[in-house]
Image (cartoon, rainbow, N blue to C red):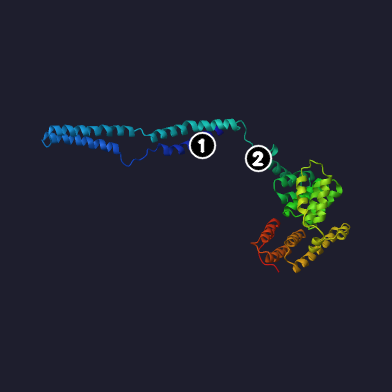
Amino acid sequence: MFFWILVAIMTAAVAAVLLLPLLRRPVVAADDAGHDVEVYRDQLEELRRDEATGLIGATEAELARAEVARRLIAASKAEAKGRASPAERRNRLAQAFVILLLPAIGLCLYIATGRPDLPAQPLAERLANPGNDISVLIAKAENHLARNPDDGAGWDLLAPIYYRSGRVEDAANAFSQAIRLLGPTPERLDGYAETLIAQSNGIVTAEARARLEQSLALKADNPRAEYYLALALEQEGKRAEARAAFEAMVKEAPADAPWLPLVNRHIAGLAGGEGGAVAGALGNPTADDVAAAQDLSAGDRQQMIAGMVESLAAKLQENPDNIEGWTRIIRSYVVLDQRPKAEAALQTALKTFPADSDNGKQLLALARDLSISAEGSGP
């Protein structure tokens, strides 16, 4: 009952605000028609006086009275017409709409689309019965985990919800807690790695790669982990190996796999620019290097990558006119978590390729994608 009283008061207040300007009569500067009527009446009275005193003859007076009378009739009609103007009629229609139709329309819409029968529900009751409200579900899970931080199932449930909601840092923490409490599974490891990749703006970091390799060891047929590991190879500049990894995914995939178009785009992008001469010029590893890297630990493999990057840096110092080389080394420094070196390489590259050139614009776009600064000066 209180709700309907409140609605009635609010409706009356809104109607009053809308009616105030409509109730004010428009102020007219001068009533021309009414003024003309008074003038013509005065002229008739003056004609009678002039005729009585002999200042004007009877014939002239009769003709003058007829002309003034004609004008007086016309002015009287104009005055009567002005009293019921179209503006006033529209004003009365607007008042009727505000008083009658507007509340009726609002009430009908509320009854049709609202829930007048729904009882009031405090926050505690909403948390107890969240329904499909995702924000309430998250709040309920967070309240539970605050009281029970070692509930691995709660972290496991909340982690993907955080990720889909765009709360990447919270998702990384939730995946980490779930793995710690419940143990690693391919789904948890893949989700954690994907969250780490999102945190680093699409770069497959060393930690993300380690988690993906662990996931692939638990489940060999895992296209999600295979894709990100192939992407890591591409980001490190290992074009031939990345292409081979993507092609292997396509061969093993069912024809209706939803991720096939994405993998095929990577294969098409990696199709050009390969070959021994190019690989040597850019400091890419040879087949022997790749074979040797398979037997290395994660730390040794990272050192091997760093050595390849240094080799590429030396080649670019000798021949700086190589846009692909600069793009690759900037990405490699970001993968190695050496952002100051990535920024320095960017500034050095911009000395060869000015910012307003096509290659310079490509470098600046890469900097935006990797979230590295394009300001300052390189070494």
Residue 50 position in % (x across, y down)? 14, 36
Residue matched to label 2: 123
Marks 2 and 1 close (CB-CB < 8 Å): no
For label 2, the crowd category at 10 Å Cα-Cα, with few meaning under 14, some 14 to 19 and many 20 or more, is few
Q: Is residue 208 left or right of residue 70?
A: right
Q: Which mark is residue 10?
A: 1
**Of pointers 2 and 1, the one earlier in the residue sequence:** 1
The amino acid beneath tag 2 is Leu
Q: Quadrant of residue 90?
A: top left
Residue type at mark 1?
Met
Q: Dividing the picture into quarters, in which one does residue 158 lie?
A: top right
Residue 300 location (% of width, % of height): 85, 61
* Quadrant of image for the C terminus: bottom right
Q: Secondary structure at mark 1?
A: helix
Q: Nearer the viewer, residue 11 or 89?
A: 89
Q: Secondary structure at mark 2?
A: helix
Where does the N terminus fall, quadrant-wise? top right
In which quarter of the view is residue 344 placed? bottom right
At 80% across and 65% down in the image, what residue appears? 311
Vertical side of 61 occupied by 283: above or below: below
Q: Is residue 14 left or right of residue 356?
A: left
Picture residue at 42% right of the left edge, 39% below the top: 21
Image location (x, y in percent) of residue 244: 83, 52
Determine the residue positioned at 82% across, 44% down.
253
Residue 191 % position (x, y)? 78, 48
Q: Does residue 356 appear to the left or right of 61 in the view shown?
A: right
On the question of residue 211 being in view, the answer is no
Q: Farthest residue in the left direction?
A: 54
Determine which of the numbered discs, if any, sits on residue 368 in the image.
none
* Comparing labels 2 and 1, the label whose residue is closer to the camera: 1
321 or 263, which is in the foreground? 321
